[in-house]
Amino acid sequence: MSTLPTLDQIEGMPIAAVAALPAEALAQLVDDLVVLVEHSRRLQTVIAAALALRAGRPAPQVAGGHTAEAMRWLR
């Protein structure tokens, strides 16, 4: 059983070294990046909704129409 590198370990590696990683490591890297992107999108939506609510504007105006989802995350 091999130990797969973490995102922190991969971050400083040259592209050629990342490309040479085993397929399992690359698949895990892609999975980790997808999770990070999803969290980033959620965070952006929550921040936009919170700022809209703070300014007294309807959340859909700023949150891109994802009000129910953003309000669920704010709870």
Image (cartoon, grey):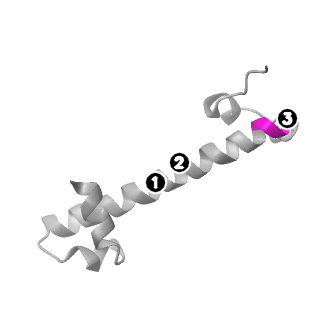
Is 61 placed left or right of 13 in the picture? Answer: left
Q: Secondary structure at mark 1?
A: helix
Which numbered disc covers residue 48? none
Magenta range is 21-25
- C-beta proximity under 8 Å, tags 1 and 2: yes
Whether residue 47 sits left or right of residue 2 in the image: it is: left
Q: Which residue is mark 3?
A: 22
User: Which residue does the image show at 16% across and 76% down from the upper left?
Assistant: 57
Residue nearest the observer in this picture, 15 or 63: 63
Q: Which residue matches tag 2?
A: 36
- The x and y percentages for residue 4 are 73, 27
Q: Name which residue lies at 24% across and 63% down.
A: 71
Q: Residue at x 61, y 47 (%)?
A: 33
Near mark 3 (Cα within 10 A), the count class, few <14, some 14-19 or many ≥20, is: few
Would residue 48 be found to the left or right of residue 42 on screen? left
Earlier in the chain: of badge 3 and badge 2, it is 3
Q: Main secondary structure of the magenta part?
A: helix
Q: Which residue is mark 1?
A: 40
Q: Amino acid at mark 2?
A: Leu
Q: How many residues crowd mark 1 within 10 Å: few (<14), some (14–19), many (20+)?
A: few
x then y, percent, for residue 56: 11, 72
